[in-house]
Image: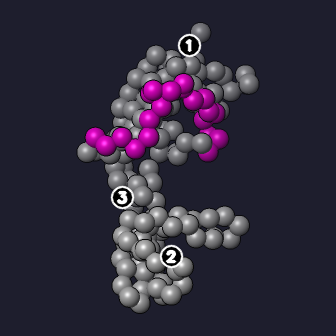
Amino acid sequence: MTITIDKGTRVTLNFALALKTGDVVDSNFDAPPVTFTMGDGNLLAGFEERLVGLIPGDEGEFLIPPEKAFGQHNSQNIQTMARHEFAQEDMTPGLVLSFKNGDGELPGVVVEVSDDEVSVDFNHPLSGQTIVFRVKIIDVQPASMH
């Protein structure tokens, strides 16, 4: 019996995430496939909803808009801080820094540097981007089998 992908099913697949420019952001087509359970939080909901109804052997390529992928770019997520708060001398745009955020860490990208201030963008690097989501479904197991 062929099982279609739905909430709770265990899905084994190869995937690739790319920008509309063709630049590949992440791919496991050159590696073993990954297995996850639909709805377990390993895949963003905007990506999961494209998989529903697919069966083993299916391949697909889907455009995921920013609001279903990594969100729209939010200018309020760009913070300006005093230059003297940063220990390193070499501050250049594009530098990725890690900031304490409660118990975790939050990456930020330096976007502008002056003698007195540093602007840091805390948006996800893929925010505002439409993502090309390519998949090949290897296996689908019912939700009860683990």
Discs 3, 1 touching: Cβ within 8 Å? no
* Residue furthest left as drawn: 21
Please name the residue shown 60% across and 29% down the image: 35
Q: Main secondary structure of the magenta part?
A: loop
Residue 81 location, x and y as percent?
Answer: 48, 84
> Residue beneath label 3, please?
128
User: Badge 1: how crowded within 10 Å, few (<14), some, or many (20+)?
Assistant: few
Amino acid on which disc 1 is placed = Thr
Query: SS class of the residue under badge 3?
Result: loop
Q: Which residues are magenta?
A: 22-41
**Amino acid on which the number 2 mark rests in the picture:** Gln
Judge left or right: residue 67 versus residue 22: right
Q: Is residue 68 above or below residue 117?
A: above
C-alpha gap between disc 2 and disc 1? 57 Å
Quadrant housing the C terminus: top right
In this view, the mark in front (3 or 2):
2
Q: Amino acid under label 3?
A: Gly
* Of the pair 99 and 70, the residue shown nearer to us: 99
| Residue 54 horizontal/vertical position (percent) | 48, 24
| N-terminal label among 2 and 1 | 1
Instruction: Kindly check if marks 3 and 2 are in contact, taking CB atoms under 8 A apart as contact.
Output: no
N-terminal-most mark, 3 or 2: 2
Hey, which quadrant is residue 104 in on the image?
bottom right
Q: Quadrant of residue 11?
A: top right
Residue 69 within the magenta-colored segment of the rendering: no
Within 10 Å of the Cα at label 2, are there few (<14), some (14-19), or many (20+) other Cα atoms?
few
Closer to the camera: disc 2 or disc 1?
A: 2
As drawn, 37 above or below 54: below
- Is residue 11 visible from the viewing direction of this image? yes
Residue of label 2: 88
Residue matched to label 1 = 2
